[in-house]
């Protein structure tokens, strides 16, 4: 049975991801910046939310925790840093496992955007939730970490199978594609993807998920040769356009 993964738009450009284990019926929300959109999406589908998962502490990824727990009883499962802004029922870090029904995720520590950022890698399901660390054709700003940490994250992601799907926290794909085309103007895969992203956004479509294979071909941060190159690209992107 196929796992259904739903993007729920929130705030200005966030996505709350919601997925259901088809065997048990358990439902998780990932990075709920708001409670109302997530609860409405679940009700529309007849789903009962059983888990609330956070990748990092930023309020646009945790702001809905309390409301969702009040409405559903779903425990909040998050890295320790989320306790700064939210009640957390279970703290997770590198090497831990998170189960949603019959689905199991490995927890990865991926610091740089925030010091305690984690990813949730559902290996058997071939999906990974990367929060604000890895985006389609981009990476997160270095708010609480270093280019060396982000480079290590990119290398770790790149080692995954090409068909693993990436679910990230924001609709940044078109802006990221424009930057990728600026720094790699001769990359035909980037040129093609920029055209596709522009067409999808013109139609109001969600550009995610992306895949490891797509990112290896078109993401300048994943393609960076070393931490110094990543740092240079990140500085350029911070002031691009």
Image (tube, rainbow, N blue to C red):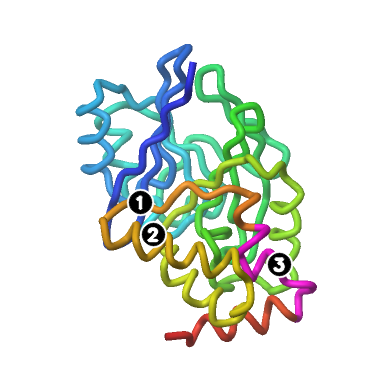
Nearer the observer, 168 or 69 = 168
In the image, the segment drawn in magenta is 216-228
Who is closer to the viewer here, 178 or 231?
Answer: 178
Secondary structure at numbered mark 3: loop
Residue 206 tag number: 1
Q: Residues within 10 Å of mark 3 (few under 14, many from 20)?
A: some
Mark 3, residue position = 223
Spatial distance from mark 3 to mark 1, Cα to Cα? 24 Å
Please name the residue shown 60% across and 81% down the image.
Answer: 183
Q: The residue tagged with tag 1: helix, strand or loop? A: loop
Q: Which mark is residue 140?
A: none
**Label 1 vs label 2: CA separation?**
7 Å
Place of residue 226 in the rendered image (x, y in percent of width and height, measured from the top left): 79, 73
Q: Is residue 148 left or right of residue 45?
A: right
Of mark 1 and mark 2, the one earlier in the sequence is: 2
Tell me where residue 103 sits by quadrant: top right
Could you say which disc has been placed on residue 171 in the image? 2
């Amino acid at each position: 049975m196929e796992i259904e993964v739903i993007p729920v738009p929130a705030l200005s450009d966030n996505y709350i991801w919601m997925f259901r284990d088809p065997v048990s019926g358990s439902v998780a929300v990932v990075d709920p910046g708001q409670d109302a959109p997530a609860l409405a999406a679940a009700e529309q589908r007849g789903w009962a939310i059983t888990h609330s998962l956070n990748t990092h502490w930023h309020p646009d990824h945790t702001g809905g925790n309390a409301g969702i727990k009040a409405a559903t009883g779903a425990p909040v499962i998050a890295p320790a840093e989320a306790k700064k802004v939210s009640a957390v029922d279970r703290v997770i870090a590198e090497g831990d496992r998170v189960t949603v029904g019959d689905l199991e995720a490995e927890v990865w520590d991926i610091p740089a955007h925030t010091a305690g950022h984690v990813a949730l890698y559902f290996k058997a399901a071939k999906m990974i939730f990367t929060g604000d660390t890895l985006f389609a054709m981009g990476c997160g700003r270095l708010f609480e970490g270093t280019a060396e940490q982000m480079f290590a994250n990119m290398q770790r992601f790149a080692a995954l199978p090409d068909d693993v799907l990436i679910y990230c926290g924001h609709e940044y794909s078109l802006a990221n594609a424009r930057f990728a085309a600026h720094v790699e103007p001769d990359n035909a895969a980037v040129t093609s993807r920029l055209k596709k992203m522009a067409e999808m956004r013109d139609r109001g479509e969600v550009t995610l998920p992306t895949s490891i294979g797509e990112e290896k071909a078109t993401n300048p941060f994943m393609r960076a040769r070393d931490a110094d190159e990543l740092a240079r690209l990140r500085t350029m992107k911070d002031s691009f356009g």
